[in-house]
Amino acid sequence: MTFEQRLPPAYLTPGSSSFLDFLAAQAPELLPSRRATPAGSAADLAPHGTTIVAATFPGGVVMAGDRRATMGNVIAQRDIEKVYPADEFSCVGIAGSAGLAVEIVRLFQLELEHYEKIEGSPLSMDGKANRLATLIRSNLGMAMQGLAVVPLFAGFDLATGHGRIFSYDVTGGRYEETAFHSVGSGSLFARGALKKLYREDLDAEGCVTALIQALYDAADDDSATGGPDLTRRIFPIVGVITDRGYRRVSDEDVAAIADRVIAARMERPDGPAAALT
Amino acid sequence: MNMPFYVSPEQLMKDRADFARKGIARGRSVAVLRYADGLLFVSENASAALHKVSEIYDRIAFAAVGRYNEFENLRIAGVRLADMRGYSYDRRDVTGRALANAYAQTLGAIFSSGGEKPYEVELFVGEVGDSPAADQVYRLTYDGQVADERSFAAMGGSAETVTTHLREHYRTGMSLSEAIQLAVDALGRHESGSRVIAVEALEVAVLDRTRTQQRKFKRFTDPELAGILGEDRGEDVGEETPAATDPATDPAADPASDAPVAPPDDTPVAPPVDPGSTG
């Protein structure tokens, strides 16, 4: 792929602001969804990422993901990153086939950036969520062979002034969630924990603590979700998005909150008790 | 059978060059300066929505003068080229040199082909490096020539006057506000004196290597610009500011006549606010 000659006519043709559309026309072989794979399941060939949780608070949204990738019963990676900023005001967390998911995230980030550069203004929050749905839908063939990618998308909507969360299914179905949501193998346990811990008046730090508690509960009951790794000091990736943009919570801050959560679990292994009524 | 008049190749090229030069000379100028933290692009542009200076990639920016539709086409092609390369290889593998080459080949081929009208544009491709020594500014002319610019450069209608002013007052390692002040003074120069360009008619952007984000391009909003220019207009900046260019003596800003047509109520569209630097 060299460009020592003049720019190809397609580059100079006005039209789409979508990098995805341009790639599909110019270099379809680079699209993750255009690769033909033989029939049969490929699920055990590559690592899978596991649990992602997100919750909104007044003025923003928080997303967190554990650090484990598994291949069958093997822990493929202990410190994988599964929460990525998609652009200045949104982030995406990925569960499912890790390699494909990372590639889809890369394409999604570029899609948002490309649109913003060409149009001079960013896509709306719903526009971004719809583009991600298109990307996931195009992966349906791979999903049917066991290489599903299920993202969780969250961001700060500049038009409405609050945080929003979107979940997806493998067919590209897009669902807006209120308050909190989780995806991945440990998501049932994480969601149960969040049901009991989440309150609408939590601030950003409260939200981060609730999400770390939820990930702890997910790791407690799901073997594919990684808990806090105390010996290696590996803790969840946490991103906070407000009207000032995406900010990854520093490792030290996450470690401090995780240490408090663990200290409390030493007293009560099942976590904070909720009132009965 | 019709016999076309014979036109020598020299004459043909000269005619095409004259045509392109005339088109470019009608537009207002764009200046680029190296300052301490990167590259500064300043142009006079009454439209807040149709830009002359734009982001291409993480470290690469684009500035143009001439016909809007032609340089907009080249800008979009540049964004596509850069994003395609960055996606195929890696973000670090997208270079200003490759982009300048692609533009040069394109402009050169169009200029010398009989079938196409030459583009009436001149471009700057700027790339900011990790240190001032690694900064690059390429200037591309309508016929596909590439020049490597040191320190500062200007193109467009009154490029020579602007360049002369820059040459007299530029020094290396200027701060951002000094560089903006100098560029705005220089763009306000014309053969018979100087004028003040209103803040609303300025388009200012930088490639700032000190930004923590991957994308180093930042566009200045009017209030930010008024803050920078206002501060420096009020006080003595030092020996580099010549007394003769005191902008207060000429308050009549000339309305930019060449600006692309845009609805006046169109709100300016800026890239996402940089959470790190709010001033």
Image: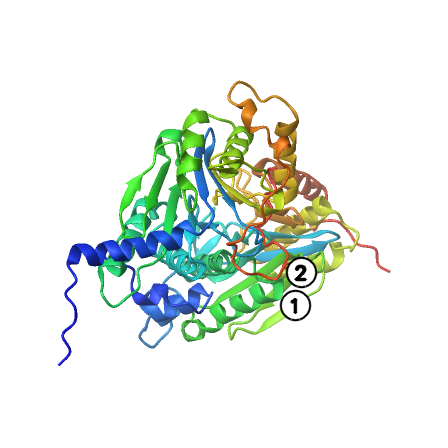
Residue A32 seen: no
Residue B81 seen: yes
Whether discs 2 and 1 lie on one chain: the answer is: yes
Task: Find residue B74 and report its horizontal and vertical position in percent.
Answer: 38, 58
Find residue A198 and report its image quarter: bottom right
The Cα atoms of the two marked residues, 2 and 1, are separated by 8 Å
Q: Would you place residue A277 above or below residue B272 in this image?
A: below
Mark 1: amino acid: Glu
**Residue under pointer 1:** A176
Residue, far right: A277
Question: How many discs appear?
Answer: 2
Task: Find residue A82 and report its horizontal and vertical position in percent.
Answer: 51, 53
Mark 2: amino acid: Arg
Query: Which chain is disc 2 placed on?
Result: A
Residue visible at 66% across and 42% down?
B223
Residue visible at 28% across and 50% down?
B101
Task: Find residue A187 and report its horizontal and vertical position in percent.
Answer: 60, 61
Residue visible at 42% across and 69% down?
A21
Q: Quadrant of the N terminus of chain A?
A: bottom left
Compared across the picture, whether B144 is left or right of B51 comes to left
Report helix, strand or loop for mark 2: strand
**Residue under pointer 2:** A164
Callouts 2 and 1 close, C-beta under 8 Å = yes
Q: Earlier in the sequence, mark 2 or mark 1?
A: 2
Find residue B32 and report its image quarter: top left
